Image (cartoon, rainbow, N blue to C red):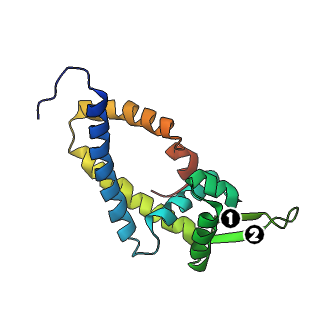
Amino acid sequence: MQRSTQPASQEDVVEAVLRASRALVAVAARSLAAAEGQVTLSQYRAMVVLASRGAQRVVDLAEALDVERSTATRMCDRLEGKGLITRERSAEDRRTVWVGLTAEGTHLVTAVTRRRTRDIRRILANMPEQPRVALVGALGSFADAAGEAPEQAWSLGWVQ
C-alpha cells in the first residue's frame, strides 16, 4: 500500500492508533487465552502493575488502574483466591493492606508476556524495515504520554 508523504491529520493519527490498538488487543486476548482463562484482562493488568511497580497498597493499585478502591479490592479478592497475589496488613497501620504477586502470579505474567512477545515479533517480521524503525520512537512516545513503565523496568531477570 502506498502511503502519502503529506503530514497526517489528527484524525488520521487517531484512526491509525485505533487500528493498531485493535490488533494489540487481539494479541493480548490470544496471550491471555493461552493462560487457560485464569484471569481476565483487567485482572492481568493489575498483575502487570504489581510486576512493574512491586508490592503496593491497594489504594495505590486502584489509582494506577484508574478504578475505585472497592473495585481494586474485589479484583484482589479474586486474584488472591486464585493464588496469584498475596495480601499483608501493615504492621504500622492495620488499615493499610499491601498486595504483591506470588511466585505463581509472577510465572503467569511471565508466560503471558512471553506469548505476547512472540506474537508481536511475528507481526513485526511482516513489516518493512523503515516503518519498524519509525515505530520504535513513535510508540515509545505514545507509551510515555500514557504513563507506561518501560519494559526493562519490570522484566529484567525474567526468562523470555
The residue closer to the viewer here, 86 or 75, is 75
- In the image, residue 156 lies at what x, y percent? 55, 50
Counting the numbered discs, the total is 2
Q: Residue at x 66, y 64 (%)?
A: 100
Q: Residue at x 82, y 64 (%)?
A: 90
Quadrant in which the N terminus appears: top left
Q: Furthest-right residue in view? A: 92
Q: Which residue is mark 2?
A: 88
The residue closer to the viewer here, 56 or 114, is 56
1 left or right, relative to 120: left
116 left or right, relative to 146: left
The secondary element bearing badge 1 is classed as strand
Q: Which residue is mark 1?
A: 99
Q: Is residue 104 above or below residue 124?
A: below
Residue type, label 1? Val
> Would residue 44 be visible to someone looking at this image?
yes
The residue closer to the viewer here, 62 or 100, is 62
The secondary element bearing badge 2 is classed as strand
Residue type, label 2? Glu
Asked whether the beta carbons under mark 2 and mark 1 sit within 8 Å of each other, the answer is yes
Q: Residue at x 53, y 45 (%)?
A: 152
